[in-house]
């Protein structure tokens, strides 16, 4: 090849030196090239300058021969030095061949390429910014180079480029973000370190607003936060911390909505640092953005709820998650229940309706008013654009809550939080929530079997709210019973007197601290609760009394007893009916929560109390001893005596005698103090004494027999107790004669029910005997 002709204006000696394997000779050739280019610059001979650069690029830097490539690199650096500030005109031609050499297999050549580019950039300074993306791309590769010399050289070039970007106000951030978004997902530690260092630099430049593009890189930052290197994790923590400071300073310019789902994903990360950091961000987002975060509530709850059951090893995450949960809950306000109705009635687009409802936080009449205002206030600035998007995704929230309740592996605190959410939603958005009641009702009933008393209490609060909320009145017949139906030929139907129940029951409203109005779900709840007790006898034994007592506090006690008595009257499983009546009777006689109801029954002064007595009596007939105790409570001593007389016709079993024994023990309790005092008035209470003697005659010679015998021995001689005014009629007789209760009919009902029990016992005994015969055969 004729080198002198082909590579002019480069002298043959220069060409030979550039191809030499010795660095010193190549350096001499570079000085000659620098001198030559300076002459062309002085002559303003741009064509020759371009020609020299082209020769160095095509014939040397991109040559197949390694020494030629090294010569080309040092020659291009020399050209840049000679051009000085004019190098900006030729930067594309200067930089491209050098960057190509970054991919060379020879580490020494990669180092020379790095050195050459350093000299080119050092001369050009701010002029290289239009080519920043290709420089950054090349540097990001060198940052992960296995050769320490190459890596060291790239770090020098990296610092130089950072200085230039920091000084300049012409950095093209919009053009750079796509490249940053791509490179941020690198798994190489050095590449990650390089990326984070650049993000920290760009954050520190006042004229560069990286916060606008945070949604583009936030996911990648959280990925890097999980790196194995402590140094990289620390750098990433610092970067995220700086972003969070910026967000707190300028919440109005933050794109909260675009980053919400990213945080939701990382709040569920297995890495503790990622999860804690994401949860802290979520806490700040909810508190700063307020209702802007509501559309993402279902995702947030999916991430937050499981964290509430973490143990002390993840205490920090648990505490932050709890704050997130509480803050999010406060964002739901009563106005969220009205948006749909406004749409339907006014037939207007969603924007005006939601704008109106969301711009009036002062309309909230609850204890959460100040909290909601505080949460929604910081983002009051983007009124027109942001608020259009703010809608409560109630369907999604309920789906998440329902899913967590069905998951038996979740912790107690999570279940409690789920039930608190359901209760809060029924309080704030009852009309929308009642659309979901049919699907929620079965799982809420099953939750009554939970191991935790606290979970059961919260569950009962939700069920009580469903049963008493006025919004439930418009929902037809309430939930279907199909989910928990006990096998049997006859279903438990709502009796016709259910309507009378709600009207008559309102007289005792002062018994309940909550809204006593019972809706269509109340009776369904009572039916399904009894079915639950019937199918899970262990639940009835261990938690039955606890559940009913709590319900008496949450709802109207009279309504509960009235409805349960009505349902049990139609119960086909007579053994269960007897057990349930015994449980209810024990609660009625011993629970402090039912003090007022006992007083109401004790005197039977009102038509409502007499109606309740008759209703209870008919169901109490399933258990003979509880029926007598109800008569003692209501001071119907003559009827009690008549009932005891009928006991002679009943089948006396061990269980029967045990219940009589318990009744004797109960008579000695404070509940029946008034009854024991009435024993002093022998003349006016003859049937009381006869009834007690009747019980005594039923008992075998046991401790209960001795106890009742000693009590009756204390009854005074009627002649000694006579006073001058012995014509005064007894209060008891006066009340009895004026109650207008058909005791004959009640007694006939008692006999009828007990006959059914006798037949059922004989059938069970017959089946057992038949089974024994089969076993023998």
Image (cartoon, rainbow, N blue to C red):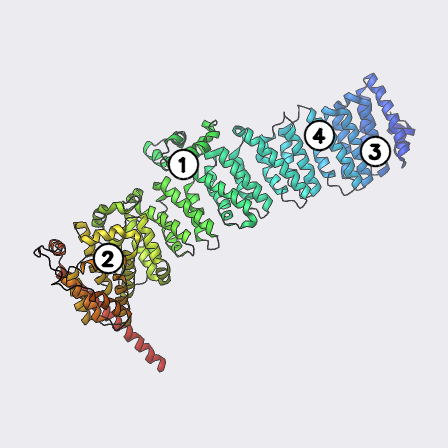
Dots 2 and 4: beta carbons under 8 Å?
A: no
Residue labelled with disc 2: 673
In this picture, is 397 found above or below 452? above
- Marks 1 and 3, how far apart at CA: 75 Å
Q: Mark 1 to mark 2: distance in Å?
A: 47 Å
Foreground residue among 106 and 648: 648
Q: Nearer the viewer, mark 1 or mark 2?
A: 2
- x 64%, y 35%: residue: 180
Q: Which residue is mark 1?
A: 368
- Residue 97: quadrant of the picture: top right
Residue that label 3 marks? 60
Determine the CA span between mark 4 and mark 1: 50 Å
Q: Nearer the viewer, mark 2 or mark 4?
A: 2
Q: Residues within 10 Å of mark 2 (few under 14, many from 20)?
A: few
- Choose top left, top right, bottom left or bottom right for residue 331: top left
Residue 646 against residue 510 in the figure, above or below:
below
């Amino acid at each position: 090849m004729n080198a002198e002709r082909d590579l002019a204006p480069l002298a043959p000696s220069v060409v030979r030196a550039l191809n030499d394997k010795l660095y010193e000779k190549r350096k001499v050739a570079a000085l000659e090239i620098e001198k030559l280019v300076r002459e062309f610059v002085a002559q303003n001979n741009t064509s020759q300058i371009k020609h020299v650069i082209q020769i160095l690029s095509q014939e040397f830097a991109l040559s197949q021969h390694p020494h030629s490539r090294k010569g080309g690199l040092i020659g291009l650096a020399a050209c840049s030095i000679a051009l000085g500030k004019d190098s900006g005109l030729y930067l594309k031609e200067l930089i491209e061949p050098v960057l190509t050499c970054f991919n060379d297999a020879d580490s020494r050549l990669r180092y020379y390429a790095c050195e050459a580019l350093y000299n080119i950039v050092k001369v050009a300074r701010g002029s290289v910014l239009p080519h920043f993306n290709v420089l950054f791309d090349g540097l990001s590769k060198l940052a992960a180079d296995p050769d320490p010399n190459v890596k060291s050289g790239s770090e020098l070039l990296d610092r130089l480029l950072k200085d230039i970007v920091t000084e300049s106000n012409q950095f093209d951030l919009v053009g750079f973000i796509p490249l940053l978004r791509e490179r941020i997902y690198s798994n190489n530690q050095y590449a990650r370190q390089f990326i984070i260092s650049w993000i920290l630099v760009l954050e520190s430049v006042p004229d560069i607003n990286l916060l606008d593009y945070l949604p583009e890189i936030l996911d990648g930052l959280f990925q890097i936060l999980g790196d194995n290197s402590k140094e990289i994790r620390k750098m990433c923590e610092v970067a995220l911390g700086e972003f969070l400071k910026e967000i707190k300073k300028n919440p109005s310019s933050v794109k909260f909505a675009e980053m919400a789902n990213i945080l939701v994903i990382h709040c569920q990360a297995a890495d503790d640092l990622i999860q804690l950091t994401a949860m802290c961000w979520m806490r700040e987002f909810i508190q700063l953005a307020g209702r802007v975060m509501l559309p993402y509530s279902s995702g947030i709850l999916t991430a937050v709820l499981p964290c509430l059951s973490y143990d002390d090893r993840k205490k920090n995450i648990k505490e932050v998650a709890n704050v997130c949960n509480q803050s999010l809950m406060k964002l739901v306000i009563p106005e969220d229940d009205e948006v749909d109705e406004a749409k339907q009635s006014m037939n207007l687009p969603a924007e005006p309706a939601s704008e109106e409802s969301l711009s009036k936080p002062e309309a909230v009449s609850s204890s959460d008013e100040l909290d909601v205002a505080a949460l929604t206030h910081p983002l009051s600035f983007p009124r027109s654009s942001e608020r259009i998007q703010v809608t409560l995704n109630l369907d999604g929230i309920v789906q998440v809550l329902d899913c967590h309740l069905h998951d038996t592996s979740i912790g107690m605190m999570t279940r409690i939080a789920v039930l608190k959410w359901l209760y809060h939603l029924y309080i704030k958005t009852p009309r929308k929530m009642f659309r979901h009641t049919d699907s929620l009702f079965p799982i809420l009933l099953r939750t009554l079997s939970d191991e935790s008393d606290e979970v059961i209490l919260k569950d009962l609060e939700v069920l009580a709210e469903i049963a008493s909320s006025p919004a439930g009145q418009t929902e037809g017949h309430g939930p279907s019973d199909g989910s928990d139906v006990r096998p049997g030929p006859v279903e438990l139907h709502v009796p016709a007197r259910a309507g009378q129940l709600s009207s008559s029951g309102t007289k005792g409203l002062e018994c309940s601290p909550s809204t006593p109005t019972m809706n269509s779900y109340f009776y369904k709840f009572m039916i399904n609760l009894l079915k639950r007790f019937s199918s899970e006898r262990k639940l009835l034994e261990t938690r039955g009394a606890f559940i009913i007592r709590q319900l008496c506090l949450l709802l109207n006690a009279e309504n509960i007893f009235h409805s349960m008595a009505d349902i049990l009257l139609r119960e086909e499983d007579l053994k269960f009916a007897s057990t349930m009546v015994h449980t209810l009777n024990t609660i009625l006689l011993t629970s402090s929560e039912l003090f007022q109801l006992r007083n109401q029954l004790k005197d039977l002064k009102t038509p409502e109390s007499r109606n309740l007595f008759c209703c209870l009596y008919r169901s109490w007939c399933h258990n003979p001893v509880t029926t007598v105790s109800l008569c003692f409570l209501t001071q119907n001593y003559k009827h009690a005596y008549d009932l005891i007389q009928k006991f002679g016709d009943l089948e006396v079993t061990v269980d029967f005698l045990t219940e009589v024994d318990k009744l004797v023990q109960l008579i000695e309790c404070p509940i029946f103090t008034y009854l024991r005092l009435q024993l002093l008035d022998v003349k006016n209470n003859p049937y009381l004494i006869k009834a007690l003697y009747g019980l005594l005659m039923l008992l075998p010679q046991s401790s209960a027999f001795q106890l009742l015998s000693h009590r009756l021995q204390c009854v005074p001689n009627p002649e000694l107790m006579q006073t001058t005014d012995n014509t005064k009629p007894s209060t008891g007789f006066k009340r009895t004669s004026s109650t207008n209760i058909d005791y004959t009919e009640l007694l006939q009902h008692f006999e009828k029910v007990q006959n059914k029990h006798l037949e059922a016992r004989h059938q069970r005994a017959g089946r057992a005997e038949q089974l024994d015969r089969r076993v023998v055969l």
